[in-house]
Amino acid sequence: QLQLVESGGGLVQPGGSLRLSCATSRHIFIQYTLGWYRQAPGKERELIANIVEGGSTAYADSVKDRFTISKDNAKNTVDLQMNNLKPEDTAIYYCNALPPFSAWGPGTQVTVSS
């Protein structure tokens, strides 16, 4: 059974920060490149950050220099530190592999609003 459970979302003012966490199984954690995706209202889901086994990372231009993806080997989690949040970051955030599995976790809602 696929295990991808996101947490950490919420309501934050522009310029604020949030830290998202994705809990997964050890197998998925060590076998796959993992990433964070998001889907804003009325838009397609998009990949915004990913991290490979060796620790190399990549980011979409829209979040580069504001978001940081990392892995916690002790907890089997993939985290996303989001700083300087903007209203356009409002979306449901998901974690998944690259390419993604057909199944998705519930996601976590991030709302950036004053």
Image (spheres, rainbow, N blue to C red):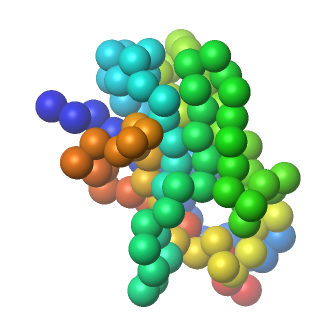
Residue at 31% x, 56% y is 106
Asked if one can make out residue 8 in the rendered structure from this viewpoint, the answer is: no
The image position of residue 90, as x and y in percent, is: 58, 75
For the image, the number of numbered tags is: 0
Q: Is residue 102 left or right of residue 77?
A: left
Residue at 28% x, 50% y is 104
The image position of residue 15, as x and y in percent, is: 83, 70
Question: Relative to 26, is 34 above or below?
Answer: below
Choose between 101 and 67: the one closer to the eye: 101
The image position of residue 37, as x and y in percent, is: 49, 55
Q: Residue furthest left?
A: 1
The image position of residue 31, as x and y in percent, is: 40, 18
Question: Relative to 2, is 100 above or below?
Answer: below
Question: Relative to 19, is 17 above or below?
Answer: below
Q: Which quadrant does the N terminus fall into?
A: top left
Asked if one can make out residue 93 in the rendered structure from this viewpoint, the answer is: yes
Residue at 67% x, 22% y is 55
Q: Which quadrant does the C terminus fall into?
A: bottom right
Q: Is residue 83 left or right of residue 99?
A: right
Q: Is residue 9 left or right of residue 61?
A: left
Residue at 64% x, 72% y is 89
Q: Is residue 101 left or right of residue 110?
A: left
Choose between 25 and 12: the one closer to the eye: 25
State which quadrant residue 70 falls in. Answer: top right
State which quadrant residue 99 falls in. Answer: top left
